[in-house]
Image (tube, helix red, strand yellow):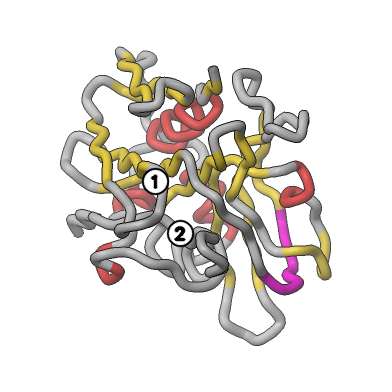
Amino acid sequence: MNAQRSGFFTAVVTAGIAASLVLGGCGSHTGTNPAADKVPVSVVAASSKKHADPELKTFTFPDGLISFAYPATWTVRTVLPPAGVPGVEAIVADNAGNDLLSVGNGFTAGCTGGPVSRRVLDQATVPGMTASDGTVPVFGFAAESYGNGNGTAYIMGLTDHRSLEEGGDVASWCNLVPTGNGGLSTRVLFTEPGFLNAGAARAWMATDQYAQLKALLVSLTYA
């Protein structure tokens, strides 16, 4: 599957309009091509064979404030939001052109969502990022499910530490990190349901693709 994606990342709050920041089944989002807003099945089937650390490039947003390192064989393209909405979205794709990650920068945004059951599969500090409220965002990979029987959604990106609380009645994941120039949103673009079960998700965590996406997210810096 070749999941080319073009469009603005998840919801922003501008001029009093609010929507949820979501990933893979946690809600809805806007975009010029919603049907293509997903990562290919190869994200699950990626080889578990380990290779040497890849050569890296650095992408810096036009405002010069946020940067990240990514494998040199991958590509980054920028997408502008709808008219009247500030910010820029960077879409990261692998060497086959499959969209893997969205990084949105410079927005006035907010999160909404109900209680979920969450299991955290991985987390790590992000030393180069400090939110405007003084907190340090964290990297996380988690599974969330609602009580309505709609299955499990997998979320991976940067978040506030409160989105990594585990339990059966916690607030749903918020992939917005406040920054001095508005906000940063990060999300790996999983297909639905992403993984058949937690075992498949943990198997993917042993692959190069997972390690490279995690390293990219942890490398994010704010000037």
Asked if residue 45 lies in the magenta stretch, the reply is: no
Per the image, label 1 sits on a secondary structure element best described as strand
For this view, does 71 lie left or right of residue 15?
A: left
Q: Residues within 10 Å of mark 1 (few under 14, many from 20)?
A: many
Give the mark nearest the N terminus, 2 or 1: 2
Depicted 107 relative to depicted 199: above or below:
above
Q: Which amino acid type corresponds to the residue marked 1 in the rendered image?
A: Ser
- Tell me if label 2 and label 1 are in contact, CB under 8 Å: yes
Q: Which amino acid type corresponds to the residue marked 2 in the rendered image?
A: Thr
Name the residue: 51% across, 25% down.
220
Q: What is the x, y in percent for residue 181?
A: 54, 34
Asked if residue 116 lies in the magenta stretch, the reply is: yes
Name the residue: 49% across, 36% down.
206
Which mark lies nearer to you, 2 or 1? 2
Instruction: Please give the range of residues in magenta.
Output: 113-119
| Nearer to the camera, 205 or 35 | 35
Q: CA distance from mark 2 to mark 1?
A: 9 Å
